[in-house]
Amino acid sequence: MEIRNTRERDLPQVLRIYDDARASLRALGIDQWQDGYPEERDIRRDMEDGVSRVVEENGVVVATAAVYVGHEPTYDVIYDGKWRTESETYGILHRIAVSPEARGKNVAGALFDYCAQLSRCAGVTSLRCDTHRGNTVMRHTLEKNGYALRGVIYLLSGAERVAYEKNL
């Protein structure tokens, strides 16, 4: 497996992976991403910002995410809990999606490890991520990879998300 920046030629595969993820979430009765998000423009913006990543295996894109070190404004206020660290900068993972063919191969774990590596190189000591309360698959994946539930955050849209953090 290779993790690298998303390229223009990856867009059709990335869009298909997100379509498959939306269908999986819909089948589970989860409203996350059912409004079409993330859209091509979101991925292109991530590409321009240098944060869009893909996991490639044998020449095929099998997963995608926005992975970077920075600050997420929606993490500034947390309810029903507390962040372990007070840092303004941390590793961030957003929009993680794995193709159906690659599920169960610890591809998401590779993305978490990649984020940890980026963070360590930047001198950052914590990683943060959020997901829909009902997304039990992602919640299990986060916990399996050492993330702890820290509380609740709200997106700019007002949607509630459960927030996780991992200290390095």
Image (spheres, rainbow, N blue to C red):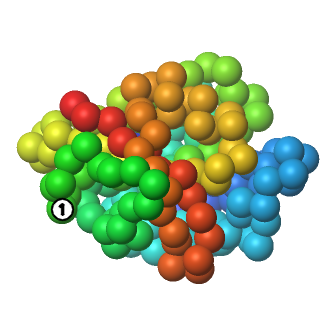
Q: Which residue is mark 1?
A: 88
Which residue lies most toward the right here?
27
Q: Is residue 164 left or right of residue 97?
A: left
**Amino acid marked by disc 1:** Glu
Q: Which of the 4 image quadrants contains residue 117?
A: top left
Which residue lies most toward the left here?
123
The answer, for residue 24, to whether it is visible in the render is: yes
Residue for point 59% across, 79% down: 157
The answer, for residue 91, to whether it is visible in the render is: no
| Number of numbered discs overlaid on the protein picture | 1
Q: Nearer the viewer, residue 131 or 64?
A: 131
Residue for point 24% across, 52% down: 90
- Relative to 30, is 138 above or below? above
Q: Nearer the viewer, residue 65 or 3?
A: 65
Categorize mark 1 by other alpha carbons within 10 Å: few (<14), some (14-19), many (20+): few
Q: Nearer the viewer, residue 4 or 109?
A: 109
Residue 40 location, x and y as percent? 63, 71
Which residue lies most toward the front here?
80
Residue for point 62% across, 45% down: 97
Q: Which of the 4 image quadrants contains residue 116?
A: top left
Residue for point 72% across, 47% down: 134
- Quarter of the image that includes the C terminus: top left
Residue 148 location, x and y as percent? 42, 34
- Relative to 28, is 76 above or below? below
Dot 1 falls on a residue whose secondary structure is loop
Residue 32 location, x and y as percent? 72, 60
Residue 53 location, x and y as percent? 45, 50
